[in-house]
Image: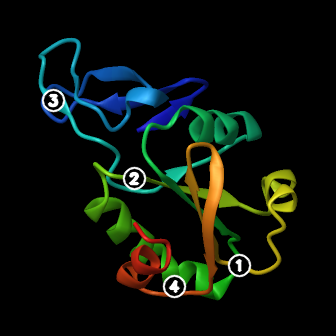
Amino acid sequence: MRTFWNVMIFDCPSCKTQNRVPVARVTSRAHCGKCKTALTPPDRPLAIHSEAEFEELIREAQVPVVVDFWADWCGPCHAVAPELEALARTKAKDAIVAKVDTEALPNIAGRFGIRSIPTMILFREQREAKRVSGAMTAQAIASNLAL
């Protein structure tokens, strides 16, 4: 799965055809344009590659979005990565998990006052609803963010 401006590209699990799905419909029932197989919502964290992708995801998502602010040099960030994968799997229909590399996108990190990493921010209806910092389990992340 990759993201491009207001759509995400999903590979069909059945026929492997690439399908364009608008960000606003990522968690709703979408089907493959070729074989009509149901496309599942994202069940792993989405890597954000630009400020435009970030803005669009927060603006268009119809479900809460958990954004993990991290950096490659950060040991606790690597420790929490599998927990975020687990969170994405368990909350696939109810939330989107995304990752912002603070080294690659410092403007986004600065705008949200990220002072320590990992920091996870929950966005609901385009606004920051809650944040937590530090490495923790998927269950603790969900509980602390009230997911």
Helix, strand or loop for disc 4: helix
Asked if labels 3 and 4 touch by Cβ distance under 8 angstroms, the answer is no
Amino acid tagged 3: Ala
Q: Which mark is residue 95?
A: 2
Q: For the C terminus, which image quadrant?
A: bottom left
Tag 1: amino acid: Ile
Eye-nearest disc, 2 or 1: 2
Q: Is residue 71 left or right of residue 143?
A: right
Residue placed under numbered mark 1 in the picture: 117
Whole-angstrom CA distance, mark 4 to mark 3, is: 33 Å
Residue depicted at 80% across the width and 70% down the height: 114
Q: Amino acid at mark 2?
A: Ala
Q: Is residue 50 above or below residue 71?
A: above
Query: Callout 3: helix, strand or loop?
Result: strand
Q: Residues within 10 Å of mark 1 (few under 14, many from 20)?
A: some
Q: Which quarter of the image is occupied by the N terminus?
A: top left
Q: For the residues labelled 1 and 4, say whether their Cβ atoms are less than 8 Å apart.
A: no
x, y percentage for residue 98? 53, 54
Q: In 3D space, how far apart are the residues under numbered discs 1 and 3 (Cα atoms)?
A: 36 Å
Mark number for residue 79? 4
Q: Are marks 2 and 3 in contact (CB under 8 Å)?
A: no
